[in-house]
Amino acid sequence: MALSRLLLSSLVLASLSLPALAASSKDDALAGAALFRDKGCAYCHGAGAIGTPKGPALTTLRTDKDWPPQKITDQILNGGKKMPPFRESLTDAEIAQLVAYLRAAKRPEPPPPAGGAAAPAPPQN
Ligand code: HEC
């Protein structure tokens, strides 16, 4: 009896810590969708990355051989000609989530924003 309870509680513990260890790329893409909206990307690239006059559409990045994941990561870290760098305002984990979002076969919709605000302006650099 005591043994089975012990077993049970260690099972519960194991399953609790699993999601953190094995966060699926689907979870990353979903987190990235919210970051894309909330960290200023959508301000220039548009909701769902469909593009605006301020920034190009990013809808075909997944299949674009010119944009492997590492290059997308570098673009976010360092910015480009008109895009600001985000190395100060995003963690490596957040950038990985953004890359997962941009490379997702089926991009998830972000969860509703906490404050109900539209795409905020990017941080000023
Ligand atoms: C101030 C406007 C602006 C913001 C904010 C911005 N971008 Fe960009 N982004 C651009 C522009 C303009 C380009 C085209 C190349 C250049 O000028 O850097 C670009 C290019 C890119 C590219 C390369 C794709 C290509 O075809 O050039 C990626 C990937 C990208 N942005 C992702 C992001 C992500 C992710 C964020 C948020 C963390 C973000 N951008 C925020 C303006 C912006």
Image: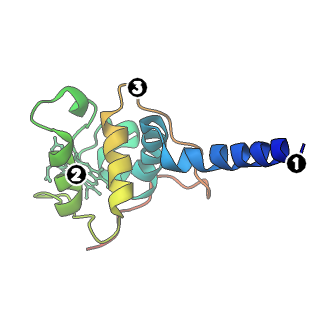
Q: CA distance from mark 1 to mark 3?
A: 47 Å
The mark lying in front, picked from 2 and 1, is: 1
Nearer to us: label 1 or label 3: 1
The 10 Å Cα crowd at callout 1, few under 14, some 14 to 19, many 20 or more, is few
Residue at 15%, 47% (x, y): give it: 71
Q: Amino acid at mark 2?
A: Thr
Q: Which residue is mark 2?
A: 73
Q: Which amino acid is tagged 3?
A: Lys
Q: Is residue 19 left or right of residue 87?
A: right
Who's the residue at 38% across and 56% down the image?
A: 94
Viewer-side residue, 18 vs 30: 18
Question: What amino acid type is highlighted by mark number 1?
Answer: Ala
Going from N to C along the chain, the mark reached first, 3 or 2, is 2
Q: Tag 1, which secondary structure?
A: helix
Residue tagged 1: 2
Residue 8 percent across, percent down from the top left? 78, 42
Evaluate whether residue 40 shows in this view.
Answer: no
Residue 104 coordinates in the image, percent (x, y): 36, 32
Q: Which residue is mark 3?
A: 106
- Classed neighbour count for the residue bearing mark 2: other residues with Cα under 10 Å, few (<14), some (14–19), many (≥20): some
Label 2 beta carbon within 8 A of ligand 1 = no
Question: Relative to 36, is 115 on the left or the right?
Answer: right
Q: For mark 3, does the 10 Å Cα neighbourhood hold few (<14), some (14 to 19), or many (20 or more) residues?
A: few
How far across and down, in percent of the image, does residue 120 sit?
Answer: 44, 59
Number of marks present in the image shown: 3
Q: Residue at x 32, y 35 (%)?
A: 50
* Quadrant of the image containing the C terminus: bottom left
In this view, 74 is above or below 86:
above
